[in-house]
Amino acid sequence: MPDADTLLDARGIGKRFNALTVLSDVDFAIRAEEAVGIVGPNGAGKTTLLNVLSGAMPADAGHILFAGQDVSRLDAPARCRRGIGRSHQIPRPFGGMTVFENLLVAARTGGNAHGAAAYDRCVDSLRLCGMLPFANRRAEALALLDRKRLELARALATAPRLLLLDEIGGGLTDAEAAELVDIIRVIRGRGVAVVWIEHIVHVLVQVVGRLVCMDGGRVIADGPPDTVLRDAAVIDAYLGSAAHDHPVG
Amino acid sequence: MIFLNQIVQGVLLGGYYALIACSLSFLFGVMRIVNLAHGSLAVLAAFMLFVLADRAGLSPWLGLIFAVPAMALVGWLLQVAVLERSLRSGLLVPLLSTFGLAIVLDNLLFEQFGADTRSLSPYIGDLSFDSWSLTDDITVGRLDVLMLCVAVALLGGLNLFLARTRLGRAIRATAEDPEVVGLIGINAHRVYAVATAVAMALAAVAGAFLAMRTTFDPYSGGAQLIFAFETVVIGGFGSLWGTLAGGVVLGVAQNLGAFISPHLFLIAGHVVFLAALVARVWLSGRNLRWLRVRAA
């Protein structure tokens, strides 16, 4: 139930692509400074939900309240300026610009920062994500892990109050994933709410206090990670028979 | 020495080509649009300046104070009314819509001004014919030198604007990925509108120099578009300094062609353009594969 502490409250979200219903009547709320993980099988509508929350796609149905204001009709740039940051599953840096410029353009437009404040925020975001040594590299010359870190740093440079992360841990080694967990813990510690889609559940549960499981465009479970992962519907839909061979956690 | 003179004159002519091409190059770099109405829009600006000079007695230099913002406004409207809608429908539609716009513009200008050729050279005094003698064989026109300087200044200014300013970075980021910039707070449509306005302001300057160095009529746009297009292709689409180099290569090629035989002026330029085009296709493996797939 939404209270004074609710940062984002999405109600009855529906989204269809022609005949294909991707989201139907999804309710999703997050409190300020909360961290929520979203899991679910491929095609469950997780990424589409992030797209609708960030404004990259308009919802066909439902309302989205952010910090008490209706943002349903705002486009992505307007929502970004209000504090919703987003990173992509496949990193999309601006090639032809340096890593630092990638952040600077984000800090100045999305983060409304000017002059020295913008530079400070970029340096801070780069340091946090371990990207400071790469600040003057061309973004297109980065390896995958560094692109992912740049994607995160760029989202941070917009000074979000809510950060939407889409499978940022995919394809990483255990050591790299551990590093990522540390970064996201620091981000949380600064009072940023985090929504994180991730298939690697044991990484996810190190950070999030609440887990949402989606299947077929609906939320089928929502609660503390332990409870959700033991939920019969979740095991059936998401983990399937594989759960018996590879216990989660 | 006559040979050297041809090269010097070619470089200076290249300054003019770079001047008329930088708007085309900029717009393609930012929006991936080849604006086929570019020549006609430059001619529109030339007519604006002509009317200001002829009716209001305003010198073309002062006229630019009015023509540049007016053309920027035209650019803004062009983006909102034509390009924005065209861009949504794929790559081919902007070509068709700007081509259509060129025809409409040419004929509106014809209806208004008739087929008479006009020029701004009577309004700029000695500048239209004055020259400096460097040696006995080589004299350079003051207007030509001015055009080369303006071209360098505009291209350098554009580069600085794109590299250093907040808006310039937003434009570059949008050119890279118009979808993702939304998620860092940039409104791509607004950036496109600003970019088109800048491009049309540049077209106004191009139109001014077109009208000062030679004569123009309502149908002069087509030829200017071809020279601008060849310049941009030779220099590499979207590269601003490349545009300057492309203009110089085209100008020198045309002048050397004319040196061999006066008939070869245009043909030499076209041959270099085609050679550059083919070389680019062959050097880029991706385009080559693309051609093969298309041919198969």
Image (cartoon, grey):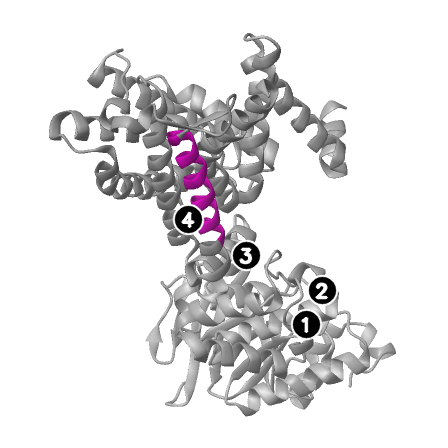
The stretch in magenta equals B142-159
Within the image, what quadrant is residue A213 found in? bottom right
The residue at 49%/44% (across/down) is B31
Q: Secondary structure at mark 4?
A: helix
Tell me the amino acid under the disc marked 3. Answer: Thr
Give residue B238's position: percent from left, percent from top.
Answer: 55, 42
The residue at 43%/72% (across/down) is A11
Give residue B201's position: percent from left, percent from top.
Answer: 34, 41
- The CA span between labels 4 and 3 is 33 Å
- Residue A21 — which label? 3
**Which residue is the site of mark 1?**
A134
Contact, mark 1 vs mark 2 (Cβ under 8 Å): yes
- The CA span between labels 1 and 2 is 9 Å
Q: Secondary structure at mark 3?
A: strand
Within the image, what quadrant is residue A76 found in? bottom left
Tell me the amino acid under the disc marked 2. Answer: Leu
Contact, mark 3 vs mark 2 (Cβ under 8 Å): no
Is A151 contained in the magenta span? no
- The CA span between labels 1 and 4 is 30 Å
Q: Is residue B276 left or right of residue B254?
A: right
- Residue B192 — which label? 4
Give residue B29's position: percent from left, percent from top.
Answer: 52, 44
Residue B37 visible in the picture: no
* Chain where mark 4 sits: B
**Which residue is the site of mark 2?**
A142
The residue carrying pointer 2 sits among few (fewer than 14), some (14 to 19) or many (20 or more) residues within 10 Å by Cα, namely some
Work out whether mark 1 precedes mark 2 in sequence or the reverse, and give the earlier one: 1
Q: Is residue A13 left or right of residue A43?
A: left
Residue B67 visible in the picture: yes
Q: Nearer the viewer, residue B101 or B277?
A: B277
